Image (spheres, rainbow, N blue to C red):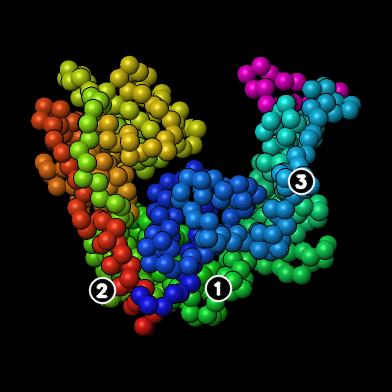
Amino acid sequence: MGVRVMLYTVTSTLPEFHGGRTKSLLSRNLFLETQLQQDHTILTTNYNPNYPQIEKRFIQRGVLSKTMKHINIFEWISNGECYQFPTTPFRNQPKYQSHHVKIKGLKQEIKEKTPEVVRYYENNQYVRYRKYEDIDKGILKFEDFMIPGVKHKIERWEYNEWGYLHKKTTYSTKRNKRLADAFYNQHGEVYCKRYFSDDERSKIIQIVLYKHGQVYKVFDSENAFFTYFFEAVLPKNAIVFNDARLIDKSLLDVKQPLKSIFVFHSSHLNLQGELKSRYKVSQARHDEISKIFVLTDQQKADVMKDYDIGSDRVVVIPHFTKINTTKAEHKEDNFVFIGRIDENKQVPKIIDSFKIYHDQGYPYGLNIYGYGEDKDIQAVETHIKDLNLTEKVRFQGRTHQPDLLFSKHRASLLASQYEGFALSVMESLNNDCPVIAYDIKYGPGELIQNGLNGYTVPPQDVEGMAQKMIEITKHPIPHVKLDEKFSEQAAIENYRALLKDLEEN
């Protein structure tokens, strides 16, 4: 490409600890910037008061460049003042706001197991709950306020990493659901309020923006709020990667023409083969989308059929990596799972297969690395105990070194119900680690060659996965590597072709 263009990515959130979607979009953006010399700006629509610190840590980890811009909607509407708080005069370091544990007129209670939590009582009535980020320094994370006759909190005040108030949320007395929240800048002024319906859905029904205490803009929906942001920030004919179905409508409602690329990170179909609800906007308005971007040929064929669109409207660019040809040494006699712990990944199914394998006298262990909701992690740990596998199956928590871990294991396991590509399969194969995976939509079938670099088994086939674990124990696959179509050079050619097509049409 001879012309240097500005590229944009719109997404709902950039969590510090993230799964495949965020990992792949960060990797894509960094790749386009460094390999194709294309400037890139990321736009996010969620609220996170700690984005400046997250960006610094992303840069330290090498997943974000110093030159890549990130604009958050709340940063934009507050003119950056949602992130600007007092600093020291000499080294420009954050000046922390301390909140003493003792509150005049209230009795406090701190339990040994949770030293960062303080409960407060007035005349034996529970009135306040505080959680500290650092109780020794008095840095608050949040505090909840209670009133007599209501079992849950009535209001929550939240503080940023430096201990400054940035948000207040009011809750319904009928149910523990939000009614309103207010956002504060460095001066303690409200710059945004959101109002929610008083029902189980707790849907945003109004957003109000303020400048210097005066209302200047009102929105009746979150979609309209996002569209307002996009219309102000995105230039005419900008090339925009959209990575989140949550913001499909908001982006399509933008008045100025855009060259939009809707990136599908997961299957658009549910387990019954029906279109997932969050994909209905893109299906109904597909003629307004420049390109639909998928990761596998199989999903392209399904999208063409389900959206009734031609081949030229759907582009396939698989995930990519620097091809590693090094043979791994010093492998441990263990299987491994690395990924999110949630309902889709079905880690208990992997444990069930391992139970069959173990009960037949085979020696390997199983290491599980991942993150997720506490309830999902607890369910996995309980399942391990219930099957009496605590000595052979170990939950190891989160990891930032998946490549190293894959290279040390005999094979990796995947039992997902669906994927957009199965990024972990690619990472495993690229680190000389064979894969045993359910043959789901989408990914494993295009990455795994049975008997050569791993095995696929029918979805939900617990016994079948166990048998392939036995097979790979008895007859190890000595060395595996990734196909060149997943190489960085292939990605360069794919992205050049995509951007050239968009610029010319």
Q: How many residues crowd around disc 3 within 10 Å: few (fewer than 14), some, or many (20 or more)?
A: few
Mark 3 element type:
loop
Q: Point out the frontmost of discs 1 and 2.
A: 1
Locate the N terminus and report the quarter of the image it occupies: bottom left
- The amino acid marked with disc number 1 is Leu
| 299 lies above or below 170 | below
Which quadrant of the view contains residue 37? bottom left
Q: Confirm or deny contact between disc 1 and disc 2 (CB under 8 A).
A: no
Residue at the image position 53 percent from the left and 56 percent from the top: 66
Q: Is residue 432 left or right of residue 492?
A: left
| 32 lies above or below 458 | below
Q: How many residues crowd around disc 2 within 10 Å: few (fewer than 14), some, or many (20 or more)?
A: few
- The amino acid marked with disc number 2 is Ser
From the viewer's side, name the closer residue of 134 and 308.
Answer: 134
Q: Residue 234 carries which label?
A: 1
- Quickly name the residue at label 2: 311
